[in-house]
Amino acid sequence: MTQSNRLNGGLINRDASLSFTFDGKSYQGYEGDTLASALLANDVRLMGRSFKYHRPRGPLTAGSEEPNALVELRSGGRQEPNTRATLAELYDGLSANSQNRWPSLERDFMAINDRFSNFLTAGFYYKTFMWPKAFWEKLYEPIIRKAAGLGSLTGEDDPDLYDKGFLHCDLLIIGAGPTGLAAALTAGRAGAQVILADEDFRMGGRLIAETGALAYISGADWVTQALAELASMNNVRVMPRTTVFGAYDHGIYGAVERNADHLIAPKADKPRQTLWRIYSKRALIATGAIERPIAFENNDRPGILLAGAVRSYANRWAATPAQSVVVFANNDDAHQTARDLIAQGIKVPAIVDTRRDAADVEGTEVLKGAEIINTSGRLGLTSVQVRTEKGYTTDIYCEALAMSGGWNPNLGLTCHQRGRPVWNADIHAFVPGDGLPVGQIVAGAAKGEMTTDAALQGGAAAAVAALGDLGITASPADLPAAADAPVSISPFWHVKGAKRAWLDYQNDVTVKDVKLAHQENFTSVEHLKRYTTLGMATDQGKTSNVGALAVMAELTGKSIQDTGTTIFRPPYTPVAMGAFGGRAVGKDFHPTRLTPSHKWAEEQGAVFVEVGNWLRAQWFPRKGETHWRQSVDREVLQTRNSVGVCDVTTLGKIDVQGADAAAFLNMVYSNAFAKLPVGKVRYGLMLREDGIAYDDGTAARFAEDHFVVTTTTANAVLVYRNMEFVRQCLCPDMDVQLISTTEAWAQYAVAGPNSRKLLQKIVDPEFDISNEAFPFMGCGEITVCGGLRARLFRISFSGELAYEIAVPTRYGDGLMRALMEAGEEFNVMPYGTEALGVMRIEKGHATGNELNGTTTALNLGMARMVSTKKDCIGNTLSRREGLNAPDALALVGLKPVDAKDSVPAGGHLMNATGPVDAAHDQGYVTSAAYSPILESSIGLAFVKGGSDRMGEKLRLVNPLEGQEVMVEIVSAHFVDPEGEKLRA
């Protein structure tokens, strides 16, 4: 296809023709093009639709500040929405589609919103969807959710890799225009470690977009020479396609390098993008400036661009949005756009300049003191309406308009730590203030120095100063002379009297919306932003905010400085979630931790379940069993009748050592540990600061200064972290040290009447583990299997005679096999987490379901474990009146009146008669299971005043599923309530 808007020259490679598609239609471009420049060269101006009104839009800019030309790139798992066509580097085979339209870009049904714009003004959603209340869930919310958003995802997994890395440097230079290049040459020649990062795939900034920026050499040629020198320096890292998106504490900057976005697919095992954390001693902001538009009636049609962008497309990409271009401006810089276009043979019917003293431009008419008051064209600009200085109106036919309201320093990164910019009346723009992040300096256009010479000299001087702070001597680099002169500008923000003059193109915010916000007293800039949606979404107001602030300043009678700015926050431009995730996807994001007996369990055909990061055996099915309950029932019955073995390695284990170890545990546990004898274990309860119970476990004392603490699997990390906080912050003077040993020891529960007999076959004979020598709640260091060191604990969470035995993890698989071999004569049974859960419910032991973040020791029936004789975490607040009411929830057991009924977990309890509602709620079920011992479904529940209601019958209801069961309150200890078995 003929590229009808392709010009001569440019920095594209015409020997490398590239094919691409847009909305299914094929086009041609060249290496060095962006998607936007290639589409413009092919006479495609319509590239998107606005968010709210779905108005036709084309590119406004040529860089990352683009609010309009947002597209979806690629397809399948690689589909990427909201990509700026102005930044998307063209490659052969690129597939792009417009977004936020239906059924097509040219015929968007949702454009009907524009017809109802009088009803969809700023803040309409705050007012419209308040009534009737019943409409919200069934009508308003579904419609809003369907209409919300811009691009779309396929839902398929992204097949590409993303990576993360760390970099360190003396000087980080952000931006590779004249300022950044001058600074990099200066610092590089001084021997400093330098990183030069720029978001563009071709470095040079405005130097490669201008025709006469330098006096004796073209900007592009000087950039090429400078980059070649920098590339030869081992101390300089040049990073094109790299966006520095955030300034953080201690000189740390976040950056995303687009390694393969310019390829149809990344090379094998190579990342698409890399997220860098850059540690800099000093950082130079050389991000240049962003041109701002002028607000006037219908200033958003495709073909209306910023003047600097039009110049960039012509000079760098050899493309023009049209063959006839009008210029509308309030400054001299835009006149250069007209000159460059005329030099390329593009017709410029007129320059409309709001200044009465504007200079003449050869080859076109300058309409001084004039304004553009309206435009025409449905899917693209066809003409502009001009009001002359004398008040006459005239139409000028054109297909493109290059407008310029001046330039704003690009100061986002200077404000990421709540710095506030200040107003510079000379350039009528905000410039960086004094509150810069530590170690950050600004130079060039980003500082308000709006000439090429000032940018070059300022970059070199800033590098010298920054390195001087670090003790590195540097001299300014030799720089070329610049041919530009200071730009004259007269502030002009919007055309008065316009009905719909656009300020924020992406969010469809107009001057009228700002006036409405003022009328309704949303005059604070933060309120203005949220009331109108100004400056939100992907462009973050880069082209819109200053114009809107100027309008609000006019309305309030304040200066723009006093009106203020919103807070700039990272990221500077959107960052892909994949980049933040890096390689942490799938199992790398949620890694699976395997128990020591995992391989053996796999050999037995175990069914596994994820428990946090752990993969644990849930049950062990056998031939002929068709339902999981059959397997679990068998495991429970065999364990209670003989002996069973369960891998409990996942329980948290913390070694606590030091002279003050006992006193330390006295502080973190609610019950007393100071006088626990050596060789004994004690069950303990931990409270949060607010008195709520959050974990339980045991502490075994192996020596006067050595304890081994166990925690629940779920809270292993939390408990260790909290204990470290107590050690370091609350009790720093205590002689105590902690270390997590969860993965250092493999641990197995051996439970059942024959558990002692089984262990006696593997415990070395010199260790007596009889009931007299090794009683209930005993512990000791032993050896097994002929000298292997081990730890033995006589504790039980099943209600049976039980032990837990631990060996170093490397021997865990071998110990499991030894236990199973030694237990063959007892028909030993491996059991999984389901059987473990059944037996703990039968015994009435609380676990995570009961320790749910809302329950106290009183609720759990453990009030006596909160010692009144010592201080501990949470002790005082646990005694609050509200937590100790006479009818407080108490843990009880439940069994169905009819044994055939089941007890649904999560169900709520109501009185036997009366209403079923929250006001009459008597409690709720936390855990439920079928007990093969009792041949009935049972459950644990919290019931108001439950300890005094034994034998009472309640209704257990599950309104969501229409269930209702009569249950009886019984003791939570269904099995061995007196504890005779576990002490046998």
Image (spheres, rainbow, N blue to C red):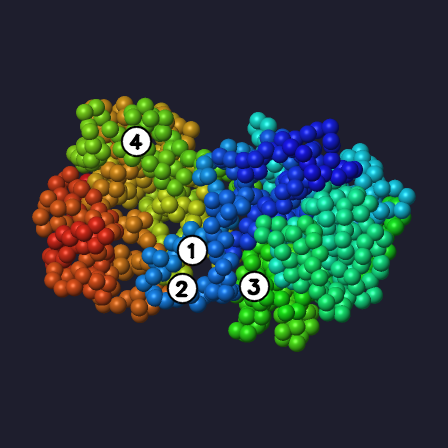
Q: Nearer the viewer, mark 4 or mark 2?
A: 2
CA gap, disc 2 to disc 1? 10 Å
Residue at 73% of width from left, 69% of height from top?
A: 391
What amino acid is at disc 1? Ile
Q: Which residue is mark 1?
A: 144
Q: Quadrant of the C terminus?
A: top left
Dot 4 or dot 2, earlier in sequence: 2
CA gap, disc 1 to disc 4? 44 Å
| Residue sitting nearer the eye, 680 or 943 | 943
- Specify whether 359 is left or right of 535: right
Secondary element at tag 2: loop
**Neighbours of disc 1 within 10 Å: few (<14), some (14-19), many (20+):** few
What amino acid is at disc 3? Lys
Res 188 quadrant in image: top right
What amino acid is at disc 4? Val
Q: Which residue is mark 2?
A: 129
**Neighbours of disc 2 within 10 Å: few (<14), some (14-19), many (20+):** some
Identify the residue at the far left of this view. 898
* Residues at circles 2 and 1 in contact by the CB criterion of under 8 Å: yes
Q: Nearer the viewer, mark 3 or mark 2?
A: 2
What amino acid is at disc 2? Phe
Q: Which residue is mark 3?
A: 529
Q: Which residue is mark 4?
A: 607
Residue at 82% of width from left, 45% of height from top?
A: 343
